[in-house]
Image: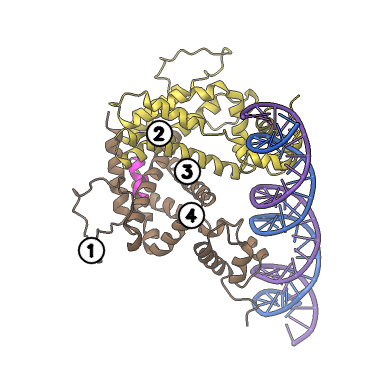
Chain colours: A yellow, B brown, C blue, D purple
Amino acid sequence: MARWEPNARGRLEQAALELYRERGFDTTTVKEIAQRAGLTERTFFRHFADKREVLFPHGNPLGENLVAALGAVPETAPPLDAVVSALRKASGLFEERRELVRHRQAVISAHAELQERELAKLASLSASLTEALTARGVPRTTAVLAAETGMAVFKVAFTRWLDAHEEPGQRAQQDRRDLPDQRDQPDQADQPDQPGQRAQPDLADLVQETLDELKALAAQD
Amino acid sequence: MARWEPNARGRLEQAALELYRERGFDTTTVKEIAQRAGLTERTFFRHFADKREVLFPHGNPLGENLVAALGAVPETAPPLDAVVSALRKASGLFEERRELVRHRQAVISAHAELQERELAKLASLSASLTEALTARGVPRTTAVLAAETGMAVFKVAFTRWLDAHEEPGQRAQQDRRDLPDQRDQPDQADQPDQPGQRAQPDLADLVQETLDELKALAAQD
DNA sequence: CTCCTGACGGCAGTGACTGACATCGCCCTC
DNA sequence: GAGGGCGATGTCAGTCACTGCCGTCAGGAG
């Protein structure tokens, strides 16, 4: 018989997300998280650098996925398009665990300290993309701009995606000004879950739409 | 006679920057900062929310400056150009205190926790710009993209500016891949401080150059 | 069987940050 | 000009994030 239950890390992650949702990030202590996971505080800090890190995936899987996806894009593609293409491919990681992502994001957007960490993670992604682009021969400044711009596009698309998949009870007072007319794109296969309700788009589609808006913006003069 | 020396906040800021430079961010305690400023630890935390905040200007002066500068840009200007124009005007805030900015930035770029805070500040700037743009009638998504893209441009330009004004002793092993040919723009009034040394460009000029690169990038397909 | 390693517990310590209360020059009012 | 409120600071105690060090013990290698 094993001396300890397996998957200590996963138990800590789950306990943390639960507690952060139940009682808020700052009012739950690491000790409580560890106890719910059947472990000690000391062990928590062996698995995670700090109290925030437990909310973020380990080992930068998204970054690796992005770099891999970028490798599959033809070298002839313009940098920004290549980045967005990689972003679209990687968006499956979000679609798969939609509920988990939504819960996680709800906690993060409720606490400034967590938003800081999130921004750092996104910056790290941007850096990964920049490296991958320079490895393709893209000049450094161009690579930085393409990566940063791509991330900006993704942020906007991700926000829209979350909005579109909100809890039904919470979607009333939402600020809709950031969803301009996009009725001129009836090409996506809408499959409304419930009649009379707004379509729930793919993240990948939203990324593409947002990129198109950006291009129009940049060409505007 | 006053009961306390004036400008406690300023003394704390200076003491903190000095100590962070002398001994590093994580090895200096708040108590030490307060002592050097002739105050107590408790007073430090009355002026600053935490140990990092002491490095960042109070009250978002840059944000207000940007919003004001944006107000002076004609409403007819395209959003991204308006943002970049505001950025260029606000860049005087950096030129004025070049040394302070460089010292501050050197400390920040040496510690991940400080970089997180910096990213949060930049995100706040981006949000201010977004608000100002929507107040001008720009659709929200467009505003977000223009603001984020503008900030990306500024980040790149700022990095270049810092590189160009580095300490002479430190500029040897620098990575120069991010400085592609820009010799085709001899229109700025170069005033080399020392003959034989590389020209030291204005931040505003670098912002403009970087924007031009971005536009070329976005138009690339 | 023995040794070693890996994953955890226990414990003490440091330092960031907070809440409650005291102090005392300054300024306003009567 | 005496009294009182205000504002900036000091003092003290306390919580909690995070770390270093050492002990424990199952399982695998030899």
Instruction: Find disc 1 in the rendering and name its residue.
Output: B191
Q: Residues within 10 Å of mark 3 (few under 14, many from 20)?
A: some
- Residues at discs 2 and 1 both on one chain: no
**What amino acid does circle 2 point to?**
Gly
Q: Is residue B181 left or right of residue A125?
A: left
Q: Nearer the viewer, residue B170 or B149?
A: B170
Q: x, y percentage for residue A52?
A: 62, 41
Q: x, y percentage for residue A145?
A: 35, 39
* Disc 2 from disc 1: Cα separation: 37 Å
Instruction: Find disc 2 in the rendering and name its residue.
Output: A150
Q: Secondary structure at mark 3?
A: helix
- Res A79 label: none
Q: Main secondary structure of the magenta part?
A: helix
Q: Who comes first in sequence, dot 3 or dot 1?
A: 3
In the image, is residue B171 above or below residue A94? below
Write down the region rendered in magenta.
Answer: B76-87
**What amino acid does circle 4 point to?**
Ile
Of marks 2 and 4, the one in the foreground: 4
**What amino acid does circle 1 point to?**
Gln
Q: Secondary structure at mark 2?
A: helix
Instruction: Find disc 3 in the rendering and name its residue.
Output: B131
Of marks 3 and 1, the one in the foreground: 1
Residue at x 63% of width, y 23% of height: A168
Q: Which quadrant holds the C terminus of chain A?
A: top left
Q: Residues within 10 Å of mark 4 (few under 14, many from 20)?
A: many
* Disc 1 from disc 4: Cα separation: 30 Å
- Res B108 label: 4
* Disc 2 from disc 4: Cα separation: 25 Å
Residue A20 placement: quadrant: top right
